[in-house]
């Protein structure tokens, strides 16, 4: 019995149950024939049905690579490259637990979250909208009950809690938490904060 693990360098490693042995399944590079959108890949997500893999690169601005996944071997086949208008500096890509939507955080000063609908049969993505949540979104995750999306922001030192419409995938701001020490330097040795 094998468990497949995807590594951010975009090599696929197979681990054998009850052992620590690793076996390289394949490595996919941006320069491979027919492959695009892996330049400085920073985030990868596997769909809950294990049939598709999504890669967000930082070097290929405004792109998401979509792959189908062979559930027996773990090998991938390139399906499409999705381009987001206006450029995009990706930081984190997440597939909702229900498999219907994909969320991409971006290190942009505005339009920091891109929302996609996901065709559960083909894995293909369609952009729904881009929204601003904080400034320079570093990460996002969807709650296991599919009701909320949590987003962290770099420039405003914040955590944002958004409600998720499970039908459309669209998000509505519920609450935000900001670090009151934003802009301060913390010195661990003394416990002092310099503002």
Image (tube, rainbow, N blue to C red):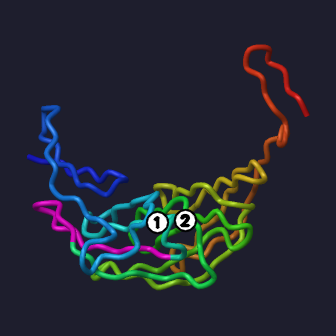
Q: Compute the Cα span from label 1 to label 2.
A: 6 Å
Q: Is residue 7 shown left or right of residue 130?
A: left
Q: Is residue 155 shown left or right of residue 38?
A: right
Identify which residue is drawn at 34% across, 69% down: 30
Mark 1 lies on a secondary structure that is strand
Identify which residue is drawn at 26% across, 50% down: 5
Is residue 111 or residue 128 the one in the foreground? 111
Please state the extent of the stretch shown in magenta in the rendering. 63-76
Could you tell me residue 131's position as x and y percent?
Answer: 68, 75
Q: In which quarter of the image is the C terminus?
A: top right
Could you tell me residue 58's position as x and y percent?
Answer: 51, 64
Identify which residue is drawn at 26% across, 55% down: 11
Quickly name the residue at label 1.
57
From this view, report whether residue 123 is shown above or below residue 155.
Answer: below
Mark 2 lies on a secondary structure that is strand
From this view, report whether residue 171 is shown above or below residue 192.
Answer: below
From this view, report whether residue 127 is shown above or below residue 22.
Answer: below
Quickly name the residue at label 2.
90
For disc 2, the neighbor class at 10 Å (few under 14, some 14 to 19, many from 20) is: many
Residue 39 lies in the magenta-colored region: no
Q: Quadrant of residue 22?
A: top left
Residue 64 lies in the magenta-colored region: yes
Q: Quadrant of residue 108?
A: bottom right
Q: Which mark is residue 104?
A: none
């Amino acid at each position: 019995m094998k468990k497949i693990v995807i590594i951010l360098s975009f090599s696929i490693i197979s681990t054998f149950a009850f052992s620590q042995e690793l076996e390289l399944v394949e490595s996919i590079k941006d320069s491979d024939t027919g492959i695009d959108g892996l330049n400085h890949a920073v985030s990868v997500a596997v769909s809950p049905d294990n049939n598709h893999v999504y890669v967000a690169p930082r070097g290929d601005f405004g792109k998401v690579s979509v792959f189908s996944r062979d559930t027996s071997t773990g090998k991938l086949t390139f399906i499409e490259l999705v381009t987001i208008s206006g450029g995009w500096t990706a930081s984190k890509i997440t597939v909702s637990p229900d498999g219907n939507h994909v969320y991409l955080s971006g290190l942009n000063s505005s339009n920091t979250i891109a929302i996609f609908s996901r065709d559960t049969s083909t894995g293909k993505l369609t952009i729904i909208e881009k929204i601003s949540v904080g400034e320079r979104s570093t990460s996002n995750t969807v709650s296991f009950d599919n009701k909320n999306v949590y987003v962290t922001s770099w420039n405003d030192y914040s955590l944002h809690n958004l409600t998720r419409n499970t039908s459309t995938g669209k998000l509505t701001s519920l609450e935000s938490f900001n670090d009151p020490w934003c802009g301060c330097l913390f010195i661990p040795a003394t416990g002092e904060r310099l503002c």
